[in-house]
Image: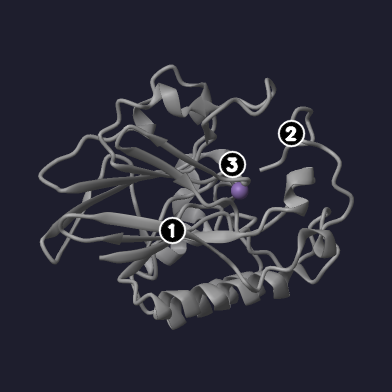
């Protein structure tokens, strides 16, 4: 079983405040490259970690782009909702959002809280689960939403859209530390929301976030970060993965406006 994971595409037709290129064209080209990678690596499905759109009810051009991507992909697309996919960060708004609509039409499959999807292939049973974003997800004392239990599977993979981080980013940004969720039974936890990404291995547990496909924040790290996706392959005895930088992503210095913060002040945006 092979998959590609991408996150935080923030599809929108307007130009974000920190960009000075044709943002819509940039995200279109990146999605084309993701399609190319899916074919080259012969993946069985993709996972999107949320913030598909920059807005819960995007304009037609943005909707058309993502629908084109799904049609060309022609594979199952599992997804969790990000904060930008929800109205006022309310999980009960999901039904009336663009990704809620795509799920109703069977174009994407939302990984609903508490649900486990079992996929079996070549002697490997994969358990797939996810957690949508919701307001205050990172202020809960109970970290259960970031954790999952394994049931009759070889590998468990849990996808989350929240501020899961190896280290605190800023006192002003609520987060959940990987050390707080280390009792999860997920072999791989896929992160989103934290746009700069991370790669943490604790014992035999992997916490992987390739970072956002879109560069939107005015953090100086965005000047040097290359957007990437994560490729994972499950075989009966062995799981392997690699981050794949997108060749089509232009250097940050060519596309970003003035970047000044390093995240320690309130320059952070997700
Ligand atoms: Mn985001």
Residue 53 position within the rendered picture, expressed as x and y whole percent measured from the top left: 59, 59
- Tell us which disc is closer to us: 1 or 3: 1
- Mark 2 or mark 3: name the one nearer the start of the chain: 3
Label 2 packing within 10 angstroms: few (<14), some (14-19), many (20+):
some
In this rendering, position of residue 54 left or right of residue 158:
right
In this rendering, the answer to whether 40 lies above or below 237 is below
Disc 2 within 8 angstroms of ligand 1 (CB): no
Label of residue 46 in the image:
none
Q: What residue is disc 1 on?
A: 242
Which disc number belongs to residue 263?
A: 2
**Residue at point 43%, 58% (across, down):** 242
User: For this view, does 105 lie left or right of residue 66?
Assistant: left
- Residue nearest the observer in this picture, 158 or 95: 158
Q: Nearer the viewer, residue 264 or 205?
A: 205
Can residue 60 be seen in the rendering of this structure? no
Q: In what quadrant of the picture does the N terminus appear?
A: bottom left
Mark 2 to mark 3 CA distance (whole Å):
11 Å
Pinpoint residue 215: horizontal percent, then vertical percent.
Answer: 70, 55
């Amino acid at each position: 079983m092979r998959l590609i994971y991408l996150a935080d595409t923030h599809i929108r037709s307007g130009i974000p405040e920190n960009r000075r290129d044709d943002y819509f064209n940039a995200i279109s080209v990146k999605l084309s490259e993701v399609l190319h990678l899916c074919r080259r690596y012969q993946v069985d499905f993709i996972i999107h970690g949320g913030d598909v759109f920059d807005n819960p009810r995007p304009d037609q051009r943005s909707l058309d782009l993502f629908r084109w991507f799904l049609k060309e992909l022609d594979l199952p697309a599992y997804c969790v909702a990000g904060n930008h996919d929800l109205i006022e960060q309310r999980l009960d708004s999901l039904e009336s959002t663009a990704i809620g609509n795509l799920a109703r039409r069977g174009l994407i499959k939302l990984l609903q809280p508490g649900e486990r999807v079992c996929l079996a292939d070549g002697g490997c049973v994969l358990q797939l689960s996810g957690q949508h974003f919701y307001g205050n997800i990172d202020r809960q004392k109970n970290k259960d939403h970031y954790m999952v239990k394994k049931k009759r599977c070889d590998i468990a993979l849990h996808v989350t859209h929240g501020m899961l981080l190896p280290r605190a980013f800023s006192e002003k940004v609520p987060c959940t530390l990987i050390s707080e969720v280390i009792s999860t039974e997920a072999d791989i936890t896929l992160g989103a929301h934290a746009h700069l990404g991370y790669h943490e291995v604790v014992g035999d547990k992997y916490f992987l976030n390739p970072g956002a496909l879109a560069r939107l924040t005015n953090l100086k790290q965005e000047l040097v970060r290359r957007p990437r996706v994560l490729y994972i392959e499950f075989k009966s005895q062995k799981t392997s993965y690699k981050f794949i930088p997108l060749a089509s992503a232009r250097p940050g210095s060519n596309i970003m406006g003035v970047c000044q913060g390093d995240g320690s002040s309130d320059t952070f945006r997700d």
